[in-house]
Image (cartoon, helix red, strand yellow):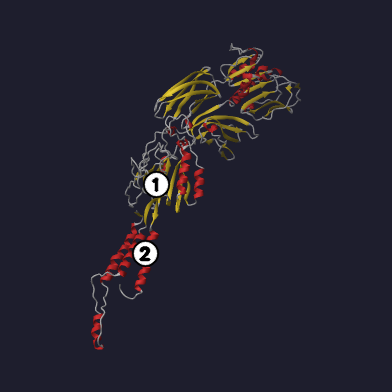
């Protein structure tokens, strides 16, 4: 039992006043009067005052004292802690950190995790507590995510509370542990009827035992036993020439050895596999040699564990240095020299030959072997060879930015007229007033492109992005005009190389979920979005996220998506064409990977009782911690281990958050006796009035 307001004790002064009144009460003596001659003497006796007389056993006195005592008790607002109901103001803190997405695995040595996550168990437990709310219960719902968020304030509608709880999702950025708990402490500091419930897996990377609470605190632990986690802690690929070397660091956060396969992919294709075994609490370094060139590398653990967000990592191809250009041409000295002046590294292949000029392997009728060093762009001068339309060459053409010069097809004579150039990065700094050719290929331009050069009313060149890859097409051959002889030609070639380079897959690196990033935007971009490309985000079927806008345009500073995985920042032009985008690896905060290593959580201050997790016998103990308000709190399953200022509830004997043979936790709440004491005082006053109406002292 507890007292919420000691200030009501001042009314207890009424008790000695009542006693004092009876000490000074006049006493009237019943007298037989035999004769009217004796009246004067009798009147003198009746008028006599006898103070400080001995207190006698009078019913009216006891009723008055009882009424005064009950009024004093009512003014002091008495209450007791009871199980099975939330009354008063309850601040519920729900842990939405990344570790809450971990699977629950209560069976040691189990290879496959269960389908239930810690967040699922949290929702079940909170629903159980909400179902136990009393009629006068108020709930403030506080989410512990990347920042503190008050979802509800003093809400009494149980349905509204359940709806907010059902919407909870784990957030993979840096969790605001101290900020959220400090906010909960501040919200309950001046509220004598408040209490705090913290639903968490206790996987906290920041200390909180120095945060003081004035209200009772109860920790509902959702920490599972037997959990294990192995993480790809680091991953990178370094190129030395045409081949690369990959290095990965695998850490085991569990207590038991972890053995699994490790697969390395390049652009979606399996490149290498290795078996790795990591001792409990240790890390190993794994090296992959002679990796072929790829734009995006991914490494992934074969075996699933209890925390999937760190089971894979990505790396991007180094893009420093000169771009590699594969030139398919019978020979064009001016073009080759202009490409070299732009800083490109050129590998030339004649259309009729079977191999590039610097390769010796061939594959018979399937065409020449692909270059070992994947080109950054392809330039096809003249009619394209037939082998470009099939096999691995077809895939290379589809994925690589290209520049087509001339080709097969019907040729037409352009109308005489002025040559006009569109405002485009390829035509920047040049002016082509005279027609650059005397013959153009007939045909319509594709829907994904727009005219780049026009001679009269006929398109002579067009450019655009096809399925995210830049394409540049000249509808004439360089040999059909004098363009290579003009001083603008090297500038044109340099512009073309720079623009085609923008179409390459570009990695923005690795960032923690929810961080901010400045992105180099395409000048033509009018809208953009984040699209899940691979990894955990794609497995979770993450929907595209519209990019942040600023003044009706795409903002340069963007917030990174909240789900880990490989994301692609895709941009579109005003005509709906897809512009070159960027890849970004989003990771969960590294501190959340250490699941299963949590220590018992506690908070500072003297707001309430604390208790450890219950033992297997399911016995019930209670611990009391005196506070400034002399409040008492009882918790079920209190066992070994106490932490000052908090009350810990263990869901069951095995430590699981739901199910099991152990008893389910019940909330402790204040039940006030104020109204009962006031009602009893009223009944006593009515009884006293009845005695008083009898007209005599009893």
Residue 638 sits in quarter: top left
* Mark 1 element type: helix
Whether residue 323 is situated above or below residue 85 in the rendered picture: above
Q: Quadrant of the C terminus?
A: bottom left
Residue named by callout 1: 185
Q: Nearer the viewer, residue 519 or 197?
A: 197
Residue 407 shown left or right of residue 616 in the figure: right
Whether residue 627 is situated above or below residue 300 in the rendered picture: below
Residue 196 rendering spot, x and y as whole percentages: 41, 47
Q: Residue furthest top?
A: 360
Q: Is residue 147 visible?
A: no
Q: Nearer the viewer, mark 2 or mark 1?
A: 2
Q: Which mark is residue 137?
A: none
Q: Residue at x 30, y 67 (%)?
A: 62
Mark found first going from the N terminus, 2 or 1: 1
Whether residue 543 is situated above or below residue 406 in the rendered picture: below
- The answer to whether marks 2 and 1 mark residues whose Cβ atoms lie closer than 8 Å is no
Residue 502 sits in quarter: top right
Q: Nearer the viewer, residue 315 or 620?
A: 620
Residue 528 sits in quarter: top right
* Mark 2 element type: helix
Whole-Å distance between the Cαs marked 2 and 1? 37 Å
Residue 137 rendering spot, x and y as whole percentages: 44, 52
Residue named by callout 2: 681
Q: Nearer the viewer, residue 438 or 632?
A: 632
Q: Nearer the viewer, residue 244 or 269?
A: 269
């Amino acid at each position: 039992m507890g007292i919420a307001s000691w200030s009501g004790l001042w009314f207890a002064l009424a008790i000695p006043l009542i006693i004092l009144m009876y000490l000074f009460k006049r006493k009237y003596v019943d007298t037989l009067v035999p004769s009217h001659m004796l009246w004067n003497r009798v009147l003198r006796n009746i008028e006599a005052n006898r103070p400080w007389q001995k207190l006698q056993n009078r019913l009216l006195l006891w009723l008055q004292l009882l009424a005064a005592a009950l009024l004093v008790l009512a003014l002091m607002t008495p209450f007791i802690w009871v199980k099975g109901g939330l009354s008063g103001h309850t601040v519920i803190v729900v842990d939405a950190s990344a570790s809450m997405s971990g699977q629950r695995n209560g069976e040691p040595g189990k290879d496959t995790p269960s389908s239930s996550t810690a967040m699922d168990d949290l929702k079940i437990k909170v629903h159980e507590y909400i179902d136990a709310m009393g009629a006068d219960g108020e709930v403030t719902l506080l989410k512990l995510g990347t920042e503190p968020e008050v979802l509800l304030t003093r809400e009494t509608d149980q349905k509204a509370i359940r709806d907010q709880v059902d919407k909870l999702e784990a957030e993979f950025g840096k969790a605001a542990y101290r900020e959220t708990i400090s906010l909960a402490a501040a919200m309950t500091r001046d509220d004598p009827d408040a209490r705090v419930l913290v639903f968490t897996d206790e996987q906290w990377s920041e200390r909180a035992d120095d945060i003081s609470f004035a209200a009772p605190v109860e920790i509902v632990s959702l920490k599972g036993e037997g959990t294990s986690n192995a993480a790809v802690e680091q991953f990178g690929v370094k190129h030395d020439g045409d081949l690369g070397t990959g290095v990965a660091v695998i850490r085991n956060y569990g207590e038991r050895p972890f053995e699994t396969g490790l697969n390395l992919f390049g652009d979606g294709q399996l490149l290498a596999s290795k078996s790795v075994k990591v001792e409990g609490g240790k890390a190993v370094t794994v090296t992959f040699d002679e990796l072929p060139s790829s734009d995006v590398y991914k490494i992934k653990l074969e075996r699933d564990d209890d925390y999937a967000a760190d089971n894979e990592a990505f790396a991007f191809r180094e893009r420093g240095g000169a771009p590699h250009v594969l030139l398919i041409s019978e020979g064009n000295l001016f073009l080759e020299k202009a490409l070299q002046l732009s800083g490109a590294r050129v590998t030339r292949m004649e259309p009729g030959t079977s191999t590039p000029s610097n390769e010796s392997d061939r594959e018979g009728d399937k065409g020449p072997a692909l270059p070992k060093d994947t080109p950054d762009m392809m330039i096809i001068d003249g009619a394209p060879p037939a082998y470009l339309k099939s096999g691995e060459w077809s895939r290379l053409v589809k994925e690589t930015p290209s520049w087509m010069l001339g080709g097969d097809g019907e040729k037409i004579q352009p109308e005489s007229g002025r040559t006009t150039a569109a405002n485009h990065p390829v035509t920047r700094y040049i002016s082509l007033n005279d027609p650059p050719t005397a013959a153009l290929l007939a045909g319509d331009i594709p829907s994904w492109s727009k005219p780049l050069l026009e001679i009269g009313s006929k398109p002579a060149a067009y450019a655009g992005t096809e399925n995210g890859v830049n394409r540049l097409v000249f509808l004439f051959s360089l040999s059909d005009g004098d363009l290579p002889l003009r001083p603008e030609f090297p500038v044109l070639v340099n512009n073309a190389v720079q623009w085609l380079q923008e179409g390459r897959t570009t990695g923005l690196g690795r960032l923690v979920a929810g961080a901010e990033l400045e992105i180099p935007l395409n000048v033509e971009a009018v809208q953009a979005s984040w699209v899940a490309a691979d990894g955990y985000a794609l497995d979770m079927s993450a929907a595209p996220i519209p990019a942040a806008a600023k003044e009706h345009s795409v903002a340069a500073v963007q917030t990174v998506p909240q789900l880990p995985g490989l994301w692609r920042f895709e941009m579109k032009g005003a005509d709906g064409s897809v512009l070159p985008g960027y890849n970004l690896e989003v990771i969960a905060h590294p501190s959340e990977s250490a699941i299963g290593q949590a220590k018992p959580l506690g908070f500072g201050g003297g707001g309430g009782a604390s208790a450890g997790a219950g033992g297997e016998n399911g016995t019930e103990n209670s611990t009391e911690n005196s506070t400034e308000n002399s409040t008492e709190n009882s918790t079920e399953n209190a066992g070994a281990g106490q932490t000052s200022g908090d009350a810990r509830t263990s869901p069951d004997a095995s430590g699981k958050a739901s199910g099991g043979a152990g008893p389910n936790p019940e909330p402790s709440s204040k039940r006030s006796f104020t109204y009962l004491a006031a009602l009893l005082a009223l009944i006593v006053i009515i009884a006293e009035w009845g005695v008083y109406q009898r007209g005599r002292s009893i």
